[in-house]
Amino acid sequence: MNTTLLRKSALGIAGLAFAGGLAAGPMNHGAPGTAALDTKPVAVAVQADKPDTGKLIPHGTQGDQSRIDLTDEQTANVKAIIAATKKSGLDERAAVISIGTALQESKLENLGHLGDRNDHDSLGLFQQRPSSGWGTPEQITDPIYSTMAFQKGLKQVDGWQDMPLTEAAQTVQVSAYPDAYAQWEKQAADLVAEHWNS
């Protein structure tokens, strides 16, 4: 056999063995006299993903969906609801239910007393009533307090995590229009997806 051909064959086999070893990953058997390879995992900075839509809307939306354009104040209230949800130790689904409820009750506006247009003594994002034990007017018009008060009620509802938004919200709010919350589920989920990790 030609020497040049034999040398090329030997180099080719060595190259395959080397490439195969790299493809299989570094091998470190700790044999004496060999340098140990550092095989510790490398920390990689990963941007937090948006919450999974299936987790935000586990039952899908019910009925026609409504949507409004938000002002800076309304967006700040969304962020306050999310912050309160995290402070309460609840997940993204609780934030969707809370934001959907506030969209229906106040269009995410922290409402004071509306005079003749007021529903009894209802105030704030969730239209909670001091006379019903939700807190003082000052507390109810604090977005963090009012959200945590709403979520305290939500936590007392058995199986709220598995309920459609409108059912969970209605159980806490006891509204005269129980199905009205459903129309805000998609926008509430979109807002949570946008702002949960911001």
Image: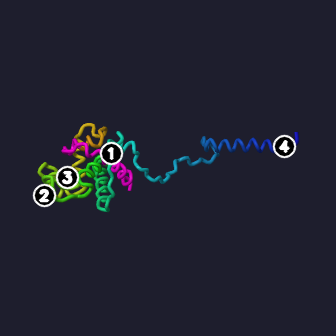
Residue underneath mark 4: 5
Mark whose residue sits in front, 3 or 4: 3
Disc 3 is placed on an element classified as loop
Residue 124 x %, y %: 21, 56
Q: Give the extent of the magenta segment.
A: 170-198
Residue underneath mark 1: 64
Q: CA distance from mark 4 to mark 2?
A: 100 Å
Q: Earlier in the sequence, mark 4 or mark 1?
A: 4
Q: CA distance from mark 4 to mark 1?
A: 76 Å
User: What amino acid does circle 2 point to?
Assistant: Asp
Q: Are marks 2 and 1 in contact (CB under 8 Å)?
A: no
Residue 7 x %, y %: 82, 44
Q: Quadrant of residue 176?
A: top left
Residue underneath mark 2: 116
Q: Are marks 3 and 1 in contact (CB under 8 Å)?
A: no
Q: Are marks 4 and 2 in contact (CB under 8 Å)?
A: no
Mark whose residue sits in front, 3 or 1: 1
Disc 2 is placed on an element classified as helix
Residue in front for this viewpoint, 123 or 41: 123
Q: Are marks 3 and 4 in contact (CB under 8 Å)?
A: no
Q: Earlier in the sequence, mark 2 or mark 1?
A: 1
Residue underneath mark 3: 127
